[in-house]
Image (tube, rainbow, N blue to C red):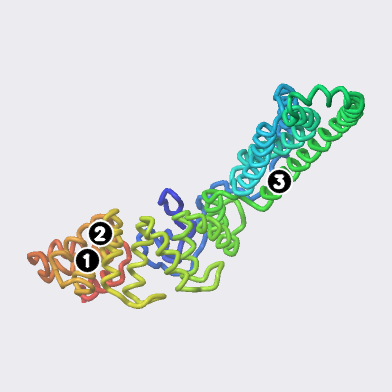
Amino acid sequence: MWDDNNEWHYSHRNADGHDVNAFGYDKYGSYRGTQLTKPSNSNTSSGSDTGSGPIDMSGIGGLIGIVVVGFILHKIFMFIKANWVSIVTIIGTCVVCAIVCFILHIKAKKAGLKILFVILASIGIIGTVLYSGTRKTEAFFYNLQRNIPELELKTVKETASTSIQTYAANFLQTLKARKEKITAVSLIIAAGIVILIVIRKKKASLEGPTDAESQHILAVNYHDGQGVPVDYAKAAYWCAKAAKQKHVQAQYNLGYLYSIGEGVPKNMAKTIYWCTKAAKQGHAMAQHDLGVCYVTGEGVKRNYKKAVYWYTKATEQEYAPAQCNLGVCYFDGLGVPQNYEKAVYWYTKAAEQGVPDAQCNLGFCYCNGLGVPRDDSKGMYWINKAAEQGNPMALETLKSLNR
């Protein structure tokens, strides 16, 4: 399987001694058979299963932060003069803050951001409770004074002084007792929210990674047996998780798994779907494989022009197999006008990168003078190069010449 650095994992060896991946393909995309064995010097880098780590202490830090901020808010509110503007502004801001931060907490993917947003949401809740609880009396007297005309104020104060003072004293005493309960309840609620977040985070760590890169690495490890037992179903599962987060290499690998039915039922339609996703993100191998599907008609209606389009996209990244196949299109006139010179051009670029099919095809062109002046020595040179890599057509050509 290809990893994120476009490095091939030679995790198996076929009966002929070729280094291949678990699918039976070499790095040039040539199929080498399924009778595979693990080489003795197989590279098994340490992969890790999802395992659990130490208990996250961020929840305790968040709880301490909430308590400290709640105390600070309480002291600040003591100096704010209460009126309808301050009441609506402060309480409205706290409520909005709590709602918005709670939504952001749900959507956040990083644990640090989740903790931050739940702390801010808890602060909004505490601020709402504290301010609405401690400012009621002051707001009552302020509005009473503001709404009574100045001329009547003295009479009202004289006649209602005793009852109001008694009511105020009783109310303030009751409020003082309730304030401690309100603060305690608020802190308990905030602590409960933080504990739920910690539990949720712990549960997520047991279920596995959430970021696409880690999910893809885990998929490769399960597929190639690097640090964990080989499990194609789990490889496909984690590959799909990463692919849905637009991880380009995971999209390509998932399409590849669907094409051979490994870990998932074989489904060429899904292969085309995921290869197209990766190809549109500029993945050269996906672009090449999509071109192959349009030539063969596997999973999609045969369309040589689209094949040439995707081959060309891949050749822009110097992807050798695409260069070879684009040469074939020019040689046979598939999707483009037949042009031996352009076929030789693309065969040469691919042959120089070691693609055996391109080397054999280039040798054929030199031996027959197609697109280049005839040169048997160059032709045999390239045919021999292809035969050294086990190219069947090159081997058959050499056998027929030696009869």
Check the image and report above or below for 114 versus 376. above
Label 3 SS:
helix
Asked if labels 1 and 2 touch by Cβ distance under 8 angstroms, the answer is: yes
Label 2 SS:
helix
Crowd around label 2: few <14 · some 14–19 · many ≥20 (10 Å): many
Residue 177 on image: x %, y %: 89, 30
Label 1 SS:
helix
The quadrant holding residue 110 is top right
* Tag count: 3
Residue 241 on image: x %, y %: 56, 58
In this view, the residue in front, 15 or 260, is 260
Crowd around label 1: few <14 · some 14–19 · many ≥20 (10 Å): many
**Quick one: label 1 or label 3, which is nearer the N terminus?**
3
* Residue pointed to by mark 2: 350
Q: What residue type is labelled 2?
A: Ala
Residue 387, can we see it? Answer: no
Q: How far apart are marks 3 and 2 (CA)?
A: 51 Å
**Quick one: label 3 or label 2, which is nearer the N terminus?**
3
Q: Distance between the residues labelled 2 and 1?
A: 9 Å
Q: What residue type is labelled 3?
A: Lys
Choose mark 1 or mark 3, whichever is in front.
3
Q: Name the disc covering residue 327, or none.
A: 1
Q: Name the disc covering residue 166, or none.
A: none
Choose mark 3 or mark 2, whichever is in front.
3
In this view, the residue in front, 177 or 14, is 177
